[in-house]
Image (cartoon, grey):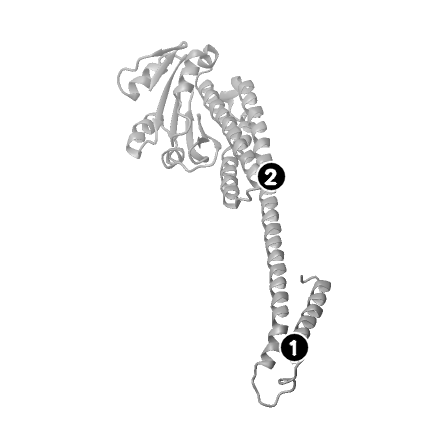
Amino acid sequence: MAIYRDGDRETVTGDISDALDAARANGTCFVWIGMHEPTQDEFDLVSAELELHPLAVEDAIHAHQRPKLEQYGDTVFLVLKTLRYLDETSDVETGEIMLFLGADFVITVRHGEANPLRAVRARVEADRELMDAGPAGVLYAVCDQVVDTYSRISQEVEVDLMELERAVFSPEQRDVTEDIYSLKREVLEFRSAQDPLIPVLEEILRGRVASLHGTKEYFRDVLDHLLRIDGQVDAQNELLSSALTAHLALVGSRQNQVAMQQNADMRRISAWAALIAVPTMIAGIYGMNFDHMPELHWTFGYPLAMSLMVAAVAVVHRLLRRSGWL
């Protein structure tokens, strides 16, 4: 918690009530209260002192909200989805930042490990224009950092997508179906975080919140960046769908090639079995050892049997070659 008076940060003495009294004693002051995953008891004192709406308080404590902008009397309530890219697993982790804005206070409630606000606080304290804008300047700085994080994550996803494309058309023919589905799920989660923020910023630019009129140019810049990121995410989603289609087509083609090769091998095996079966049949007939069989005691019986085997095999071999089985 900190008090900002005339662009300077002051040390807080006392509790939240004392800080608010000090801020309200001078119209150029505002209080910034930062909280991370607060419990109901931790938030009760703040909500009671600032008379926050119970529905907004419930959203801030339990999280799991879509990006949205709501106004309860003179208090503005804004929800932002934060993202964090995990290099170890290439996963996109989702968190949330809720902001309560009044004339002389701003409360930031953060859920998850993404987008810590120390850098935002340092930026606001170093920028006199943002300090002069008060809570609206803080809101802009938070939105700008969140969208900048979206941009960095989009670049990381782009790298992962290029690696997947190379794997799809790699000669190694590795099955990357699960990897494509996993990245597509991360892209969709990314999209669910950034896409609903577009109408929120558009509402601010249309002047829905009177207390933010003086910072509309800042929010227009954030919206421009967000729209560019939105186009990148849409393109990545389409490329992943195309990569999945191409991968499945290549897998099907390889399976067809394997099946065709197996069929050709089976035909060759069957053809050689037929070639072996013909002389085997002739030899089997003459090996039955009956007493009264023709040619058993004939001088030319053996050469005749061998010639018959060779001729039969030659005929069968010729027929199989003509049919393409050999």
Residue visible at 52% across and 36% down in the picture: 191
Query: Marks 1 and 2, how far apart in space?
Result: 71 Å
Question: Residue 300, located in which quarter of the rendered image?
Answer: bottom right
Q: Identify which residue, 257 or 80, lies in the foreground.
A: 257
Instruction: Identify residue for label 1.
Output: 305
- Residue furthest to the right: 322
Residue type at mark 1: give it: Ala
Residue type at mark 2: give it: Glu
**Nearer the camera: disc 1 or disc 2:** 1
Res. 104 in view: no
| Numbered mark located on residue 238 in the image | 2
Q: Quadrant of the C terminus?
A: bottom right
Residue visible at 60% across and 68% down in the picture: 273
Q: Position of residue 12 (x, y in %)?
A: 30, 15
- Residue furthest to the front: 299
Q: Is residue 288 above or below residue 169?
A: below
Q: Is residue 222 above or below residue 284?
A: above
Q: Position of residue 219 (x, y in %)?
A: 53, 22
Q: Identify which residue, 226 or 234, lies in the foreground.
A: 234
**Does 148 sit left or right of 296 as displayed?**
left
Q: Position of residue 132 (x, y in %)?
A: 45, 12
Under tag 1, what secondary structure? helix
Marked residue nearer the N-terminal end (1 or 2): 2
Q: Residues within 10 Å of mark 2 (few under 14, many from 20)?
A: few
Q: Position of residue 322 (x, y in %)?
A: 73, 63
Q: Identify which residue, 60 or 64, lies in the foreground.
A: 64
Res. 178 in view: yes
**Does 194 sit left or right of 303 as displayed?**
left
Under tag 2, what secondary structure? helix
